[in-house]
Amino acid sequence: MKFCDLNKQMELIRPQIDENIQKVLEHGAFILGPEVNEIEETLANYVGTKHCLTVKSGTDALLLAMMALDIGPGDEVIVPGFTFYATAEMVAFLRATPVFVDVDPETCNILPSEIEKAITSKTKAIIPVDLYGQCANYSEINKIGKSHNIPIIADGAQSMGARHNDKMACGTADMGCTSFFPAKPLGVYGDGGAIFLDNSEHYEKLKQLRNHGQPKRYTHTMVGHNARMDTIQAAILKAKFEIFPREVELRNQVAKTYSELIKAEGLNVTLPFVAPGNLSVWAQYTIQTDKRDQVRESLQADGIPTAIHYPKPLNKQPVFSHYESSLPTSEKLSERVMSLPMHPYLEKDEQVRVVESLKKALG
Ligand SMILES: *Cc1c(COP(=O)(O)O)cnc(C)c1O
């Protein structure tokens, strides 16, 4: 059993992938070719924002979004303590200060009440993360942003395809950043990412930041970056997107089956919780148990791969050890979470095997 089986998906769409790549080889526009514009339009429509700008990775999406807001030394950016490193890494990369706040024990997403307490006169942005594929509480967070005049950047690297009330993930805030890393819900065959937004001024600036700060060739008006997504990855994304809405349904089906099987066995684990108004895209199916390490070993022995997202909260990472902060929920989650195999083509009998192995491991 694989933790995330990308081959099953590839078998389904191989002819379309081959055809799309072939077209790029023929026209030869490997950088910012026509497929890049096409997929940007498709994705902007899907997410419901005016603009979509593809970039080289989810990490670059976060970096450019903050560059568009002129975030730099002396500025503070509020991020959850329980997320993948890149969220805070790019804040520090710009020599700004990440301010870690704690998360909700049920959704594992940033707590609006804790954001409110962390705001200072130096706060230049808030970056909620849609952990495991579920949107953060943007209804509350956007209110806080508005009342303090602080922009919100959604880190939707794990949540493309998810929904929060009437909004699609990445269309929930002033800007939304996503990743097309192969194992994300919508992935390519390499690195990729995108920024979603309505603000046309910021969009024009982002477009230049993506390409060495040039409004026109060899005229450089600002310090930018080379953050363009390859045309071949855009061509792959086009083929992947065709089956993506169906895959969002399949992921929800797989998650539902896990929860039903685990409940039917009455296993002593904490199931993932989806808040009312949210549709998760289940980037991960993550349970919690105090016997985490023992359970993982037992599943491993049965040939079932698991993963920990994430074993250390960011405030405890060596690189950030000079910040004094205590985040009790993030710290507790990092000791209890474990993710089970998850992808749209996981079979019911495979899920039964996982849950039987879990039952055995929990004694
Ligand atoms: C994957 C991920 C990123 C980084 O995306 P890359 O495309 O790998 O650079 C950022 N934030 C979160 C929450 C992620 O899961």
Image (tube, rainbow, N blue to C red):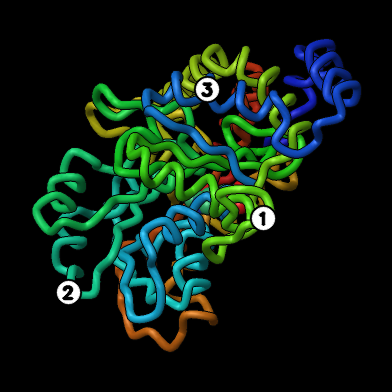
- Image position of 133 with respect to 74: above or below: above
Residue 139 has which mark?
A: none
Residue 208 versus residue 161 in the image, above or below: below
Residue 265, visible in the rendered structure? no
Foreground mark, 2 or 1? 1
Q: Position of residue 172 (x, y in %)?
A: 31, 36
- Left or right of 180: which side holds 251? left
In front: 324, or 193? Answer: 193
- Label whose residue precedes the other's in the sequence (2 or 1): 2
The residue wearing badge 2 is 121
User: Mark 3: which amino acid?
Assistant: Glu
The residue carrying mark 3 is: 41
Q: Position of residue 122 (x, y in %)?
A: 23, 75
In this view of the protein, which residue sits in the foreground, 93 or 221?
221
Left or right: 80 as drawn, with respect to 45:
left
Please give the residue where the numbered disc 1 appears in the rendered image.
226
Q: Residue at x 48, y 32 (%)?
A: 160
User: Mark 1 to mark 3: distance in Å?
Assistant: 21 Å
The amino acid type found where label 2 is placed reads: Ser
At label 1, the amino acid type is: Asn
Return the disc, 2 or 3, that comes first in the chain's sequence.
3
Q: Give the mark nearer the N terminus: 1 vs 3.
A: 3
Q: Secondary structure at mark 1?
A: loop
